């Protein structure tokens, strides 16, 4: 299934949470869509998610405007938590820990380990 490359005019390197109102006629419940915006303001979403973002904008739940910049014929697979091993998410959490604790001593890195069985 092709993807849609979209661009946000002002946000960079962020995760934007876009609330969708749902649809009582079809029983679709309200839902938040988490859109990962890269350093250039771009994101790749499915055609379905693109439609939901437009509905959220029309319902006035989202004031964010995106521009479609192209179609992605073979978009990368989306896996919850990043790559299958979860390293990007653990690295981000490690960075957050470093930010909270402040500079760590030389040679010390914040590290998160997976609990056994996960």
Image (spheres, grey):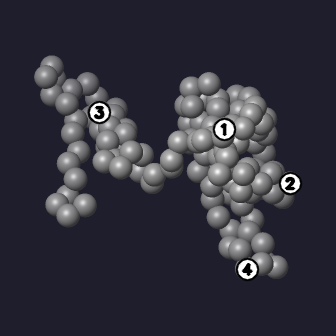
Among numbered discs 2 and 4, the one appearing first in the sequence: 4
**Real-space CA distance between mark 2 and mark 3, rounded to the nearest whole angstrom:** 40 Å
Among numbered discs 1 and 4, the one appearing first in the sequence: 4
Where residue 23 sits: x, y (%)? Answer: 78, 72
Depth order, front residue of 11/50: 50
Side (left or right) of 64 relative to 112: right
Q: Which of the 4 image quarters holds residue 10?
A: top right
Residue in view at x 56 percent, y 36 percent: 14
Q: Please give the residue where the numbered disc 3 appears in the rendered image.
A: 98
Side (left or right) of 56 relative to 88: right
* Residue 109 higher or lower than 51, as above or below: above
Q: Are marks 2 and 4 in contact (CB under 8 Å)?
A: no
* Residue 53 higher or lower than 40, as above or below: below
Residue in view at x 77 percent, y 54 percent: 51
Q: Please give the residue where the numbered disc 2 appears in the rendered image.
A: 58
**Real-space CA distance between mark 2 and mark 4, rounded to the nearest whole angstrom:** 19 Å
Depth order, front residue of 36/109: 36
Q: Are marks 1 and 4 in contact (CB under 8 Å)?
A: no
Q: Secondary structure at mark 2?
A: helix
Residue in view at x 25 percent, y 61 percent: 118
Side (left or right) of 42 relative to 111: right
Q: Are marks 2 and 1 in contact (CB under 8 Å)?
A: no
Mark 4 or 3: in front is 4
Q: Please give the residue where the numbered disc 4 appears in the rendered image.
A: 27
Q: Please give the residue where the numbered disc 1 appears in the rendered image.
A: 72
**Real-space CA distance between mark 2 and mark 1, rounded to the nearest whole angstrom:** 25 Å
């Amino acid at each position: 299934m092709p993807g849609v490359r979209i661009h946000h005019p002002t946000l960079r390197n962020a995760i934007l949470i876009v609330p969708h109102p749902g649809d009582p006629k079809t029983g679709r419940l309200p839902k938040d869509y988490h859109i990962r915006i890269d350093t250039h303001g771009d994101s790749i979403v499915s055609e379905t998610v693109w439609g939901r973002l437009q509905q959220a904008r029309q319902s006035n739940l989202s004031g964010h405007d995106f521009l479609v910049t192209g179609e992605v014929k073979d978009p990368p697979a989306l896996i919850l938590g990043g790559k299958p091993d979860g390293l990007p998410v653990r690295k981000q959490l490690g960075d957050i820990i470093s930010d909270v604790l402040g500079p760590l001593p030389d040679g010390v890195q914040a590290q998160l380990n997976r609990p056994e069985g996960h």
